[in-house]
Amino acid sequence: MEKSNKENKDMDDGERVEWSELPKELLPTIGKKLDTRIDIVRFRSVCNTWRSSIPHFLSYSPRFPLIFPTPYTAPTPIRTPAYLCQSTIYRLQSLNPSSTSSNKAWLIKVEQDSNSGGKFRLFDPISNRRTRYPIPNKTLNLFDSRVVELTKAYTLRYQFRAGSSTSTNEIDQVLSVFDTSIFGVNKVVMFPDSPWTNVNASAAFVIFNDGKLGFAKSGDEELILVDRESFDYDDIIVYKGQFYVINSLGIVSWIDHSSLKLVQFLPPLCGLGSQKHLVESCGALYVVDRYLDRERRRVENDAFNMGGEDCAQSIGFKVYRFDEEWGRWELKESLGDRAFVLGNDCCFSVMAKELSVYKRNCIYFTDQDEVRARVFSLEDNSFGYLSYSEESHPSWPLPNLL
């Protein structure tokens, strides 16, 4: 038996190929199969040979923020274009936690601005509210943290620079950029968007004015109104590489972005809620139907209307999963170990037990014009607020993160 085990070990050692001995001509092929920037960072940090086999980015790939046609006409004194901004939501976990801290992961939302020297900024993953401190622009230390990209989010903003600060302090430079989200823009999605995508091949859809559906490609000067008869679209998602949109009646349509035709893809949901959200979880398509205590406030053609009036409050949620085999929607009483996050600019699913603070079978959200995140439990239909603790987020700023 000992001889047999030794022979098997020798055979395994003889068949094993060290990564450093891979043929150099295979490295670009392997590297260009990676879809996320964090994976490319990992690939290029293996060694000098791997680093030189693929570029950090291509000259024609999207570099955010991108100038984008605004859905509104800005007031005369405001002479600034709209910008399409991209942020990425990561699950971040320390590989060397201290004896007093939890080993669970947390969520961070990061935006990199190529126009300000590649500086990083932090946002709350649920409310999209910007945090006070930016992330130092340093190299990601993969030996200290496990970083997993969960999803990307997009938003439209007007961008200003406050004064003409000549400070050399990185924090002062980043905070001198003043962003104004374009009021009335409910959702923006873009596809494809990978490090190997030509920006001219990317398309973006925008839901604005609480229901209008617009379309534009990079370099366009105006948004194209996709549907001139229906102005009641609630949400849009990229699911399995295709654009899908849902209206307030629960009708899900597939969008052919080459012809801009909408094709009803799924049977109507017939949910009675006030607002529909599309969520992908574990490869399946879900609709979260939100019930409100009053009619949603409608947004007029005013990009700078900041609200101020009483807004509708959430009073309940129902969750439906599309059964591809039977071609129907199924009401789900439980999300199991997962939790849904209905962010202001993207919706996504997480495994709750892997994260600090987040609980299973819950929906996390904010109401209109609110900042504090709320929680709805599907188990007992109760509401609460997300309570942050010292373990729920790392200390700001994050050293050696990016």
Image: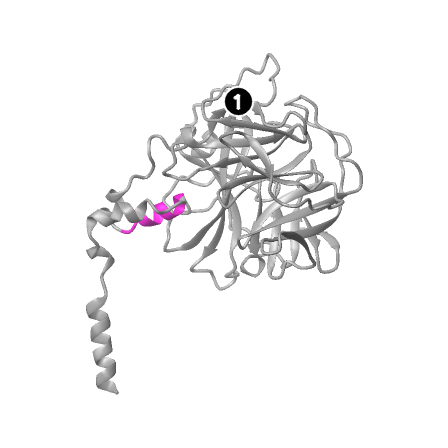
Question: Looking at the image, can residue 114 be seen?
Answer: no
Q: Nearer the viewer, residue 124 or 351?
A: 351
Of residues 244 and 181, the one drawn nearer to the viewer in this rendering: 244
Task: Return the x and y of residue 274 as percentages of the image width and height.
Answer: 74, 41
Dot 1: within a 10 Å radius of its alpha carbon, few (fewer than 14), some, or many (20 or more) residues?
A: many
Q: Nearer the viewer, residue 187 or 257?
A: 257
Specify start and end residues of the magenta stretch as a single range: 37-46
Left or right: 228, with 47 as reference point: right
Which residue is found at the position 68% from the left and 29% from the top?
Answer: 231
**Vertical comparison of 247 with 25: above or below:** above
Give the image location of residue 164, x and y in percent: 47, 20
Query: For the point 66% across and 21% down, which residue is it?
Result: 302
Disc 1 marks a residue whose amino acid type is Pro
Quarter of the C terminus within the rendering: top left
Please tell me in which quadrant of the rendered image residue 254 appears. top right
Check the image and report above or below for 281 versus 169. below
Dot 1 falls on a residue whose secondary structure is loop
Which SS type dominates the magenta stretch?
helix
Tell me, yes or no, whether the highlighted magenta stretch contains residue 318: no
Residue sitting at x 40%, y 45%: 35
Q: How many marks?
A: 1
The residue labelled by disc 1 is 69
